[in-house]
């Protein structure tokens, strides 16, 4: 039995919620302190075999702020900060990725890729935004997809207008039917499928109906784990069918007046799915 357990591939995945390296955190990075945002937590992130999160801003020095209530842009050096903290993959499917337009979106992707940080959920066209990132970790092949489904903001901005099309950059919108098609395809290429979902209502600890529908659609199609964010507060975990849904991991690095509670979701994955949380 011990020999069988030792032979079974096991991956320690760490997941966090919203990461926004503008405002005071961005100023610290611009001043040259690249380790400041994650100095007290890097050692924990480094324990994982693979670490994922949601980058809640543009990244770089290109573009101009779009006409919406809040616009965030982390400095170019923040890509190195994220790499030094141990991030392996970041979702860009959120309501701030295009805060400085498509040119800034592409620059941010390029800067992250130069630091060997993968991105999902956004791209120069629809196919790219829905393309899974596939990576072998400890002999398990993992596929990652990311989507956004957030309500119209208080000041009237509709994130769905950022949906990527056949010939225009943008994000992967969380349409349940499209999620199922994407997940089904990813299942043919990987042992396990992990979906990152930016959805729900801000400051509401209960998942919204569209949030639940998107998460269930992913699991129904074969995903093993759904990792949620956007609400800026912690939400619950659901054990649904053969999968696990963490609806909201709250803020991880985000200058905000909201609740201070945050979390790192540590999931141990084997060939059957989530073995342990």
Image (cartoon, helix red, strand yellow):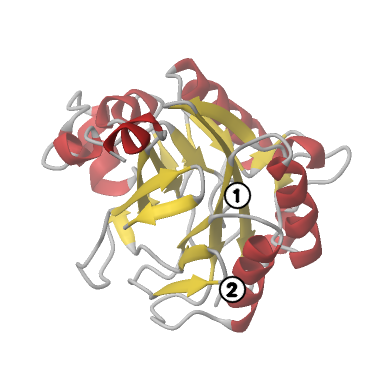
Whether residue 136 is situated above or below residue 182 in the rendered picture: above
Q: Which residue is mark 1?
A: 146
Quarter of the figure that contains the N terminus: top left
Q: Residue furthest left?
A: 40
* Any part of residue 61 in sight: no
Looking at the picture, tell me which residue is in the foreground, 41 or 195.
195
Q: Position of residue 157 (x, y in %)?
A: 64, 67
* Any part of residue 68 in sight: yes
Looking at the picture, tell me which residue is in the foreground, 115 or 167.
115
Residue depicted at x 19% and y 36%: 42
Q: Position of residue 211 (x, y in %)?
A: 59, 73
Q: Are marks 2 and 1 in contact (CB under 8 Å)?
A: no
Distance from label 2 to label 1 (Cα)? 13 Å
Looking at the picture, tell me which residue is in the foreground, 150 or 90.
90
Q: Which residue is mark 2?
A: 211
Q: Earlier in the sequence, mark 2 or mark 1?
A: 1
Count of residue discs: 2
């Amino acid at each position: 039995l011990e020999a069988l357990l030792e032979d079974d591939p096991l991956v320690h995945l760490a997941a966090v919620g919203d990461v926004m390296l503008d405002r005071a955190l961005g100023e610290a990075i611009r001043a040259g302190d690249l380790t400041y945002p994650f100095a007290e937590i890097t050692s924990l992130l480094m324990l994982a075999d693979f670490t994922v999160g949601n980058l809640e801003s543009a990244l770089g020095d290109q573009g101009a702020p779009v006409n919406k209530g809040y616009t965030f842009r982390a400095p170019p050096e923040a890509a190195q900060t994220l790499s030094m903290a141990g991030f392996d993959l970041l979702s860009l499917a959120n309501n701030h990725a295009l805060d400085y337009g498509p040119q800034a979106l592409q620059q941010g992707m390029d800067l992250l890729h130069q630091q060997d940080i993968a991105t999902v959920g956004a791209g120069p066209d629809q196919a790219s935004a829905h393309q899974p990132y596939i990576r072998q970790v400890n002999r398990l092949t993992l596929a990652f997809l990311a989507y956004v489904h957030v309500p119209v903001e208080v000041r009237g901005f509709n994130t769905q207008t950022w949906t990527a099309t056949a010939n225009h950059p943008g994000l992967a919108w969380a349409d349940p039917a499209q999620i199922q098609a994407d997940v089904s395809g990813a299942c043919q290429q990987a042992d396990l499928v992990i979906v990152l979902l930016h959805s729900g209502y801000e400051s509401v600890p209960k998942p919204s109906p569209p949030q639940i529908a998107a998460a269930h659609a992913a699991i129904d199609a074969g995903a093993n784990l759904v990792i949620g964010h956007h609400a800026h507060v912690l939400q619950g975990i659901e054990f649904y069918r053969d999968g696990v849904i963490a609806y909201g991991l709250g803020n991880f690095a985000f200058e905000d007046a909201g609740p201070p509670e945050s979390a790192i979701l540590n999931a141990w994955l084997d060939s059957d799915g989530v073995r342990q949380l």
